[in-house]
Image (spheres, rainbow, N blue to C red):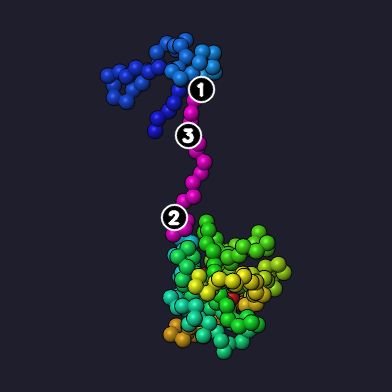
Amino acid sequence: MILCVPGIFHLISSPGALLPTTPSTESPRGMRAGTATPTPCFQSTSPRWDPTKDLRAIASNFCYLENSGWYWGAVTAAQAHAALQEASEGAFLVRDSSHPLYMLTLSVRTARGPTSIRIQYSCAQFLLDSSSPARPSLSSFPSVPSLVQHYMGPERKAEEGRVEEEPPSKASQQGIQQTTVVLKLKQALYKPQSLPSLQHLTRLVINRQTDCPDQLPLPRPLLRYLQDYPFKV
């Protein structure tokens, strides 16, 4: 790093050493006489985002999703919508996004039929993607299960209930305006190949009955098992 300080310097025999000489009264080249001397230029030391936080957040999130049973992985929108077609309103699943700028997508059965909503990730937080005026009021969460749990519960804000559908492909998008959909998450649609175990279903029942499972009189291994998935869905 080079530190810029007014004055003229001479190199001496010690490597990397700089000693200032007597300040010159002459104006630097390119500057008229009487012009103020430039102030020292120091680089700003604004804090930078630690990428390891992203790694931890993404890794822990996918561990949660793999345990959830409603993460379908790399399925297409058509496959997800076909699975939701006969489900009741409010059934949902999470899958890998087909868009290169997004990791995950929430597919849900609405009153108008199955639709998909992209999940945005930024600075270790997940939120539903939207460009509508309600976007500033959308809450963000440290994991996708906590996001889903929020939209299943009564604590969600009224303005958060309307979100934008994932737009169709470019080939079929001409002349179609973006629309909003009322989001009601009620029941997870489990992937047939990865149905949750009896232990996991029991863990969900315990989590739904208490907000402090770590205070239950249970053996330590069971408490750790509850902490591995602290969600109700």
As drawn, the residue found furthest toward the left would be 13
Q: Which residues are magenta?
A: 39-55
Q: Compute the Cα span from label 1 to label 3.
A: 15 Å
Q: Amino acid at mark 1?
A: Pro
Q: Residue at x 58, y 81 (%)?
A: 114
Pointer 1 residue: 38
Amino acid type at mark 3: Gln
Q: Nearer the viewer, mark 2 or mark 3?
A: 3
Please rate how many residues cluster around mark 3, counting C-alpha atoms within 10 Å: few if below 14, some from 14 to 19, many from 20: few
Callout 1: SS:
loop
Whether residue 41 appears in magenta in the rendering, the answer is yes
Instruction: Indicate yes or no whether the magenta region holds residue 202.
Output: no
Residue at the disc numbered 2: 52
- What numbered label is drawn on residue 43? 3
Q: Is residue 91 left or right of residue 42?
A: right
**Residue 120 to residue 186: above or below:** above
The residue at 43%/75% (across/down) is 74
The location of residue 125, given as percent across then percent down, is 55, 61
**What residue is shown at x 57% (from left), y 89% (from top)?**
86
- Camera-side mark, 1 or 2: 1
For the residues labelled 1 and 2, say whether their Cβ atoms are less than 8 Å apart: no
Three-letter code for the amino acid on which mark 2 is drawn:
Thr
Q: Nearer the viewer, residue 203 or 65?
A: 65
Nearer the N terminus, badge 1 or badge 2?
1
In the rendered view, tell whether residue 227 sits above or below residue 24: below
Q: Nearer the viewer, mark 1 or mark 3?
A: 1
Q: Is 54 rendered above or below residue 77? A: above
Residue 163 at least partly seen: yes
Pointer 1 and pointer 3: residues touching (CB < 8 Å)? no
